[in-house]
Image (spheres, rainbow, N blue to C red):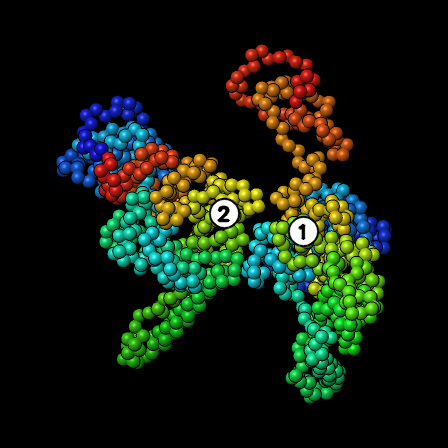
Amino acid sequence: MLKNKKLIMGLGALWSLSLLLAPSWSYAAPLIDDDKESTDSEEEEEEETWVYLAGGDVYTGTGAFLRGAGILCHDDKIEAIGFDIVVPEDAEVLNIEGYSVYPGLIALSSRGLFGGNGDLEYSVDPFSDNMLLAVAGGITVAVQGTEIGRLNRGRIEDVVVGKQQFTSLSYSLSNPGGRKTLREKFDAAETYLRAYRTWEGAVRSNKELKEPKKTGVDSHALAVLRGTEKGVFRADIQQDLLAIARLAQRYGFRPVIQGCREGWLVAAELGRAGATAIVEARDRRNKSENLVRPGGSSIENAAILHRHGVQVAVAPGSGGISMGGIVGRDIMHMPVEAAFAVRGGLAEDVAIASMTVVPARLLGLEHRLGTIEVGKDADLIITDGDILHYKTFVQWSVIGGRVVYDKEAELYLAHIRPRPVEELAPEVPVVPGERDEEIIEAPKEETETPVENPEEAPAEEPAPVDDGGEEPPPAPEEPPVVPPVDPPVDPPQEGSGDG
Amino acid sequence: MLSLTVPLTPRTRSISARIGRLMILTTLLMAAAPALAAPPGDLLAIRARHLMTGSGETLEHVVLLVENGKIITIGEDLPIERGIPVLELADDQWVVPGLVNCYTRYGMSASGYSDLRPNMKAVDELSPRTRASVSGMLGYGVTTAGLYPAGRGIPGQAAVVSTVSGSLSEMVMRDAAYLKAIVGNTSTGKRYLRDGFKEADSWLAKEAKNREKYDKDKEKADKEKDKDKKKEMLAKLGDYKPLAPSEKGQAFLDMRDHKISLLASIGKSADYLHFLDALGDEDVKWDLRLPLSSECDIYHVKDKIAESGARIIVEPMITLQRATLRQRNLPAELHRAGAKLVLVPRRDSAMKDWFRDVGVMVGAGLDRDAALRAMTLEPAGLLGVADQVGSLEVGKEANLIVLSGDPFEAATEIVAVMARGKIAHGEDEL
């Protein structure tokens, strides 16, 4: 309790400080999440977990980039972000000075990342290699089938985050009959909606009016028009895209277009329709040889779409993980996929948004995922550089408020550009038994100041002697098995010099 | 060499004036006293150079006294009263307890159902023919066996039998020891388990309702003023008859009453978590069965398993680490983590190589005493018969194996097997 009080005071201090600092701090206001509160009230007897990420360069995804800031996670939520955070004593502290923190990536489609088939709740294998590799690729939340799951490594609780509310629609030139049917469905739904709204207004004064009947109205078309489901089209050809844009404008919904390879040719129209494009930036589509006008895929696709107001989300090139795909073309490479779009002119912050907040919005979970904000889910990735750089690795992942991935500790990628040695825990020196006494007799005092700053410490300085003085090994109770024939009365420097 | 020698001079160094020893000596004399009058028919002493008790001790120069198939004394350097027949073992021979194979279908058909059938019992499969083949395990040193029900899902309850051939009642030690359940990261395995407990709950609810109705009727009858009518009504009601036990729920009720335990068969770490999830807050005794596969990843949860206090049945098998193909000794890792290890033969057909396979694991770092315990006392505990068999201790059945050498040396062979005090196998070898 006392600890919490301290924390609240700390947060208060932080809050007042932040008000002084910059107006952009307004995002520190906690977001309210009602449905989460209700599940918490079940009172599981689990202990609170606190994780503190100290000194990282935080890319919040909301326009701020905080150098050397701290992030405090409480259970599965972000409790505080800033520079003067009071950290509870029992918090697990991860020093990430020099590393960057990004919001966790969201894979809009995936296969087998959860290590099983069927309902996530029943089939998740939180120890599977696929999950490990997906987390190593920076993914924290993925869609499998229609379920949205969190890559909660090592735990089967709290895996399911929600359900994907997508309705698959087709509106293609090659299928005029299908187009007609879809239009009719939307017509019926529109008529019903108009009647319903009229009734909704009139029923307040006249309670005897009957609710209009839903018979013959396609529930999905209705849900799309009401906005409770998202109409998703799989389309690439510009004519199809154009038709979808006009359909959406005619009936007033915001289409989601998967593929959208020729979208750059009709970007203005798509932008007016308020479309979201799920693109695979590295995908190729050849120009139709029958047409003179431009066509085919373009590396500038994402950039042009975004310039015209189309929201861009990046989908992994392939949904699954294959062992051959560690360095190949698979889900590991969402950032690389986005980097292709950057190469084609997309702004970098938009490219990051295309893997984080835009998918979150598509899934209807932008109040919990997609950016680093107080009150949002603690799904963070810590990288050794710019996430869009091909060399960058995810070094740690915090998912659901727990550190679930450490590149150095896992099998697959630890050997590729390992973290610098001084970042590792100091090795316990193995001092041969005979030399123990010498060191105990003459501990070297002058070099004993503990290394405050690892960067200042000479990298190749041998550790054993330092540690021997700092923490003398326990004096052996028994005499050595083979006592030194003639214990040398060495000056202390010599004894420690050959450590 | 089964020699009925009468040692005239007890080993002098045995009288080392230790109080504990003296007490054993007195009990020995008291036990032997009636044998002097009558021919010592049931009394037999065994003198062995090396003996492993199965409970974690290795003794030297041991004397073991057997009466009526039970061990009545065991100790180092004890004198033997004259008149008691003595089985003198050679210096290089070892004595270990009779093995307990708690998970076998030796000599029984492997086909079974794949759904929720907790009412099935393996004991019902014991025909004279299968009884004879079960006794075939004696030759491999197995004196107690847990026969599991075949099938997937929740196929039924396992029986505990002594492998000494005899009548059904002589052989069967417990007709229901554990309920087997196969739980994986699929919906079916978890659902069966939950369904079973639900079944038990619904039966309990029905039973409570039935009881309530009876009580109400009884009350009504008691209030009746007309004596004849009252008598008639009471006679009609009779004593309370509980409902017929629920076919599928009964096993789950028995588990809650700790009459039987639950054996969850899992394949990997994830299954363990799913099993705990499916079990919820149910208070049942449970153990684990893990068929080791080459890329088994149970090491993720070994500490949790150790903490839970459950036993875990595995085969003596070196597994490979996925991706690096590094060899792992999972049984040794589990033991080191503190889990209660139970070892079973790699296959029923590989029972003859059981000692050798475990010897490989011992060579690869598994603790010796833990290895033997995992073949004797732990499985006996899992089967709920640890008070009768599983180790060489006073009061337990005299089930033991004479080995030609160290149990975990590759060249060691079984010389003879004693079950319930009788040499059941290899009499000519002694």
Give the structural element (helix, strand or loop) at label 2. Answer: loop
Instruction: Report the chain holding disc 1.
Output: A
Q: Is residue A309 above or below residue A341?
A: below
Quarter of the rendering containing residue A30: bottom right
Quarter of the rendering containing residue A442: top right
Quarter of the rendering containing residue B260: bottom left
Give the residue at mark 2.
Answer: B294
Viewer-closest of B73 and B3: B3
Residue farthest along the top direction in this orientation? A486
**Split into 4 quadrants, where in the image is the C terminus of chain A?**
top right
Q: Is residue B128 left or right of residue A445?
A: left
Q: Position of residue A226 (x, y in %)?
A: 72, 75
Q: Is residue B242 left or right of residue A113?
A: left
Q: Residue at x 77, y 76 (%)?
A: A247
Give the residue at mark 1.
Answer: A328
Judge whether residue A96 can be spotted in this image.
Answer: yes
Judge whether residue A257 can be spotted in this image.
Answer: no
Give the structural element (helix, strand or loop) at label 1. Answer: loop
Q: Is residue A480 left or right of residue B426?
A: right
- Report the amino acid beneath label 1: Gly
Q: Is residue A219 above or below residue B367?
A: below
Q: Residue at x 19, y 34 (%)?
A: B85
Instruction: Report the chain holding disc 2.
Output: B
Count of marks placed on residues: 2
Label 2: few (<14), some or many (≥20) within 10 Å? some
Q: Position of residue A329 (x, y in %)?
A: 68, 54
The tag on residue A124 is: none
Q: Residue at x 68, y 61 (%)?
A: A108
Q: Residue at x 66, y 66 (%)?
A: A164
Residue farthest along the front direction in this orientation? A290
- Report the amino acid beneath label 2: Ser
